[in-house]
Amino acid sequence: MDAERSKKQWRTDSRLRRTKTVVLNSGEEKEKRAEIRQYFHDTFDLDESLLEMLKHDETFCLRADPLRHPLIFYFGHTAAFYVNKFLLARLIRERVDPAYESMFAVGVDEMSWDDLNEENYDWPAVDQVQAYRDRVRRVVDEVIETTPLQMPITWDNPWWVIVMCIEHARIHLETSSVLIRQLPIDQVRPHPLWEICRQSGSAPTNELIDVPGGGVEIGKSRDHPLYGWDNEFGNQSSDVKPFRTSRYLVSNGEFLEFIDGAGYKTQRWWTEEGWKWREYKQAVRPLFWISADGSYKLRTVAEEIEMPWDWPVEVNFLEAKAFCNWKSRQTGKPIRLPSEQQWYLLRDRCLDTDQPYWKKAPGNINLEHYASCCPVTQFKFDEFCDVIGNVWQWTETPIAGLDGFDVHPYYDDFSTPTFDGLHNLIKGGSWISTGNEATREARYAFRRHFFQHAGFRYVESEEPVSVNVDVYETDRSVAQYCESHYGEDYFGVPNFPEAMSRVCLELMGDRPREKALDIGCAVGRGTFELAREFQEVVGLDYSARFIRIGVELKNKGRVRYARSEEGELTSHREVKLSDFGLEETPPRVSFQQADACNLKNLYEGYDLVLAANLIDRLYSPRKFLTTIHERIKPGGLLVIASPYTWDEEFTEKSEWLGGIRVAGEPFTSLDGLHECLESYFTRLGEPRKIPFVLRDTKHKFQHSLSEVTAWRKQG
């Protein structure tokens, strides 16, 4: 493959670096279909051209960052995402490659449920992933060509999912470039399509400029003309007091003063979190600075160059915050990073256009100028420079949902896992921010110790920044499950996850109790209950929104949620594992995000698999049932509970196990279970019914019966 790649003609079509996100509320069907098709292919090509910077096939499998997968994962991930989301949205009916679509599904942001263990992966060869990408490209092209299109394209339109997948790939264009930048320099090579800026000089003297106060509106409505991620929708109105902010982004030259002033060696400049990171990493300079013979060089994506002192410094939040604390002491002024609201106020005073409406990018953004940073003096916005572009700008504001926030059903874990007080917003975009990333409303956030092409400007302000790091779970669906798993018992009905675990433990008898798998674990009560007696229990769920509750309980021993009472009224509850005698179980429990119909090979060798109230919410329950034997030891148990509430919203009728007529005769779900399982399992005893109650409000409850069957694996 190396020889073939070296002979491949470099893509030099500069048009790829001038693409803009699609306007979704205007245009004729034929032209809009062609525009989106071109946007897709340009995105696919741009992604592949970036990875042509990798020198060898083996380079794809190097871990550039221990908190991220190797680049072979992202090479496959951006393609597999189309398949997984298209299946969910029913734009396609069959997978392209089930193994790849499991391997390349999740594991990208150091979440507790991400699987970053290299022992669980046998990465395919580069040419195999390229062949897979080619197949996916053809599938997506056919979907774009054949899916009915009616304008406008809105949140609940199938075409929204198509654009979602394209914009997702553009996010990874940026994150992949950061990883390439961290690889050994002998593993990468420059690319003519990705030419860096060659201008540099002395760092300018920074100064603080007055910004008058004013009102700020953040958020957009569902009829907005551009695609947006769920955290962009809603609204937030603020009155921002006057403040002062730096004319320029902090340059490498200005940051050098912090280094020379023993900034990395002086604990008082750092937050507690920041100093722990500095001590752990033994950091003494920014990540992309290279110390060379008493001077410094800068690592760009694929080159090492003499230090451009007038380019913006690129650091994580913790370093930026330490600099601000140091600067505050040097100047005697209240120096800090801007809030999200202050950034918006500055942006809107300096810029009255947005991508895709500008003729040419007014800053170093959208790949319209350079494939690197450039001097902080080059792009002026009235009295300021780089209000957008060059590098992302760290803010003091942790990301949270706006008023009216709602999760998009086809990507429910895009935003909510970051609403934890640990992910700070970055604003303004970088030189490689394209598509949605380069728009005003973009709201992206990263953990404070993560690196992007991100720097900062500082503000002088007495106005406090509201930081809520101890939030209550307000997602209505998640909070409902919190109450179901950890709340009160209603109408004399025992807690369902607890009751199911007791049934499982009773059925186990004298069988080994080493490993259990709880598939569809939701917020995790059953997982913890099984760990009373099992040595290891893994809870799996497709939704990271649910999993993060279990993770919080495992890590902190408690969780808080807002329970709906009546209309807009809520009550707040805190529950602890110790309330249920489960405080000793966390070391035996882990949670992972997974698709029950397409599990990774690592999930095997279980003495018990529990699937409680799961099968009637799967897109392919037959696929799940006809393959689950591969996960269970001979003699092990499969326990299934379901109310059999088949609904075409979740499962196409052709996939229903029962509740239908076959050859004119009634065919029950129990009949369907036998049909799927009897080749590998023997049913134990008669089905039993276990009730459960879901609380909607204090006046409305859903009471159901779940039929429980137990199956012993033969052999």
Image: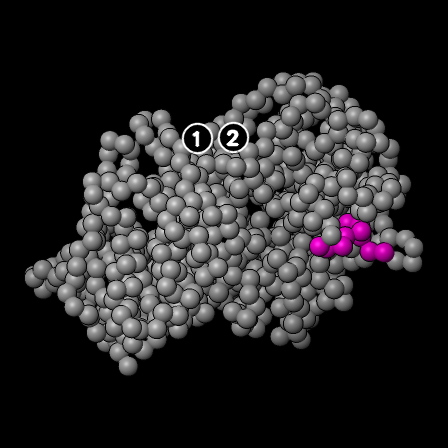
Q: Indicate whether 393 appears above or below 334.
A: below
Relative to 449, 561 lies left or right: left
Q: Amino acid at mark 1?
A: Gly
Figure colour scheme: one colour
Tag on residue 404? Answer: 1
* Residue located at (67% from left, 54% from top): 178
Quarter occupied by residue 479? top left
Q: Which residues are magenta?
A: 280-291
Q: Amino acid at mark 2?
A: Gly
Which of 344/470 is in front? 470
* Residue located at (90% from left, 53% from top): 295
> CB under 8 Å between callouts 2 and 1?
yes
x, y percent for residue 92? 36, 57
Q: Nearer the viewer, mark 2 or mark 1?
A: 1
Q: Residue beneath label 2, please?
A: 219
Report the quarter where the N terminus lies.
Answer: bottom right
